[in-house]
């Protein structure tokens, strides 16, 4: 199946997963900036990867806008984020931001990434550091808020190839 993996990555986690998916399927792998300039109609499967940002998947609008033109193709979206896959909030996030995708028969997956403050643009870095400080100063913090503040206080990487396995399986299912 001729496949393309398109990704939008800020600090490298989404790109890493895109490359792993492309390796596993012999797919073409393109950053979104390049994919926007290409005609993707020759592909039988289109995989889009973006990162979790403010309750949405980054640049998902591009994918949604093009979905009607890709009718009949296998469509997959994966999202990377800083939360471990087992965090119940991950499924809540996916349910909330992907209803429209699932109605269009798009399969959606989550791949844990991490935080890389060194590669983050300054505005994002400042926003995240302010968020951490607000969590730390909050009175009557929940255990989840304490855990989150501790986890995102510094850079970390929780990527793992095992999270592309369900995506690869979805691409080979007929």
Image: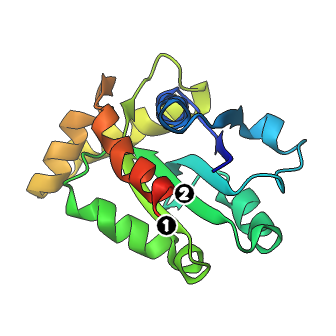
| Residue in front for this viewpoint, 52 or 71 | 71
Location of residue 71 with respect to 83 vertically, above or below: below
Q: Is residue 37 visible?
A: yes
Hey, which quadrant is residue 113 in on the image? top left
Q: Position of residue 137 (x, y in %)?
A: 23, 44
Mark 2, Cα crowd under 10 Å, few <14 / some 14-19 / many 20+, is many
Count how many numbered circles sit on residues in the image. Answer: 2
Check the image and tell me how it is coloured: rainbow
Q: Position of residue 46 (x, y in %)?
A: 66, 54
Q: Position of residue 57 (x, y in %)?
A: 55, 56
| Residue in front for this viewpoint, 97 or 138 | 97
Taking the view exactly as shown, the residue that stands out farthest to the bottom is: 103
Numbered circle sitting on residue 107: 1
Label 2 sits on a secondary structure element that is: strand
Hey, which quadrant is residue 103 in on the image? bottom right
Cα distance, mark 2 to mark 1? 6 Å
Q: Position of residue 8 (x, y in %)?
A: 64, 40
Q: Tell me what residue is drawn at x 12 percent, y 58 percent.
A: 142
In the displayed structure image, the side of residue 159 where residue 78 appears, left or right? right
Numbered circle sitting on residue 13: none
Q: Tell me what residue is drawn at x 61 percent, y 51 percent.
A: 48
Asked whether the beta carbons under mark 2 and mark 1 sit within 8 Å of each other, the answer is yes
| Residue in front for this viewpoint, 156 or 111 | 111
């Amino acid at each position: 199946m001729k496949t393309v993996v398109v990704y939008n990555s800020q600090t490298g986690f989404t790109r890493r997963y895109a490359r792993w998916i492309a390796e596993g399927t012999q797919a073409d792998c393109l950053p979104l900036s390049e994919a926007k300039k290409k005609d993707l109609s020759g592909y039988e499967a289109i995989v889009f990867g973006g990162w979790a940002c403010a309750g949405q998947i980054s640049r998902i609008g591009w994918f949604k806008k093009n979905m009607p033109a890709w009718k009949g193709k296998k469509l997959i979206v994966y999202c990377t984020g800083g939360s471990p896959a087992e965090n119940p909030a991950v499924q809540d996030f996916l349910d909330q931001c992907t209803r429209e995708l699932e109605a269009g028969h798009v399969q959606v997956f989550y791949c844990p990434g991490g935080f890389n403050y060194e590669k983050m643009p300054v505005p994002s870095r400042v926003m995240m550091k302010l968020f951490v400080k607000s969590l730390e100063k909050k009175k009557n913090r929940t255990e989840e808020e304490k855990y989150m503040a501790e986890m995102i206080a510094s850079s970390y990487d929780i990527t793992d190839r095992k999270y592309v396995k369900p995506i690869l399986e979805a691409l080979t299912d007929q």
